[in-house]
Image: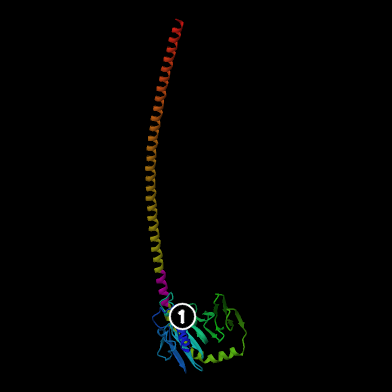
Amino acid sequence: MKKIIILFFILTLLGSQVISYAQNEVQYTDFEAKVIEIKKDVKYRKARDWWKFWKWEDLSSEVKLKAGALLKVGKDSQLELEFINGTRVLVKANSNLEIANGKAGKNKSSYFRKQSLKLTLGEVWVKTIESLSGITRFEVRTPNAVAGVKGTLFNVKVDSKQETEVRVDEGRVLVANNNDDERTVGKLQRLRVNREGEFEEIKKDQEASNDWKSVKPWMEELEDWVKKKKHEIEEKKEGWKEEEQEREEESEEERYKDNEERDEDDRNHDKNDDESNNDHRRDDNISDDGRDKDDSASSDNNDRDDSNRDKDDSDNNDRDGHDRDKHDHDRDNNHDRDDD
């Protein structure tokens, strides 16, 4: 009996992994994020080992994480990641997350790539570059909410009750629940999304101050990285403008080509309509000629029938008159005999 229960448990786990993988099929072949720093105990499972739920490996700084990779940050541990679109993420202790499948943006540059991670338990801090405001698209997905970056520094927590808390320290963050209800969280504001998806505002307390103190050293370390990234982005912006112009020109050419094709289709359609109308007119003329012939034939038949009836009537009248004349003659002869 115990063996059956254990087997059922294993099959259930495998089934859930299969469903999860099928729903989040990895399509991007390159990596989504690289490891910047690891402190103490951090485990990961490769995307291709999704079915080996028992197989966890120690994460090293040489690993480049692809979509579907699972991460576990242990007690008193920490992990720092940099996503290819220029987003830095600090993963705090006792956190479980998954690297989600990114989507290419309108520009070839990786900075325009839409990326996200799935946080099932624990806490992450997200930092983006001010120069990428309006360009960077990064989301933190939790079991009951999605926090999309509009600011440059925000924090997301998921507790054991599966409730989500979002805190913004710079800029704004758009938060949506599973019912697609949305709420914008401004600078120095906090918002909780409970298991039912309801929004609850949280007043500032000592815990928030302690959270900021714990992440302040990380922010100070990022200052040089931020300056370097800003300089790199400014150099690339001119190239982005040229690419944007090329895309607009290509789009204009495509629109012109599409209009030409539509005009040609319209002309062909009109031509087909004219041919169809001519065919219908020919069919109508043929039908009218047929009806005229039928009417003429019918008229001839009627004329013949009338002529025959007139002839028959004339013959009958002639016969009737002859019979009456004969009868009168016979009667006169009879009278003459009687007189004799």
Instruction: Classify the position of the C terminus by image quarter.
Output: top left
Question: Does the magenta portion include 241?
Answer: yes
Q: Position of residue 207 (x, y in %)?
A: 59, 90
Residue at x-position 59% and y-position 79%: 199
Question: Does the magenta portion include 307?
Answer: no
Q: Please count the marks in the image.
A: 1
The vertical placement of 37 against 319, above or below, is: below
The vertical placement of 13 against 285, above or below, is: below
Q: Amino acid at mark 1?
A: Ser
The residue carrying mark 1 is 20
From the viewer's side, name the closer residue of 23 and 256: 23
Residue at x-position 39% and y-position 35%: 298
From the viewer's side, name the closer residue of 245 and 269: 269
Question: Main SS type for the magenta part?
Answer: helix
Q: Residue furthest top?
A: 340
| Res. 109 image quadrant | bottom left
From the viewer's side, name the closer residue of 325 and 86: 325
**Stretch in magenta:** 238-248
* Residue 63 visible in the shown view: yes
Residue at x-position 40% and y-position 89%: 63
- What is the crowding at mark 1: few (fewer than 14 residues within 10 Å), some, or many (at least 20)? few
Q: Position of residue 269 (x, y in %)?
A: 39, 55
The vertical placement of 214 against 307, above or below, is: below
| Res. 318 image quadrant | top left
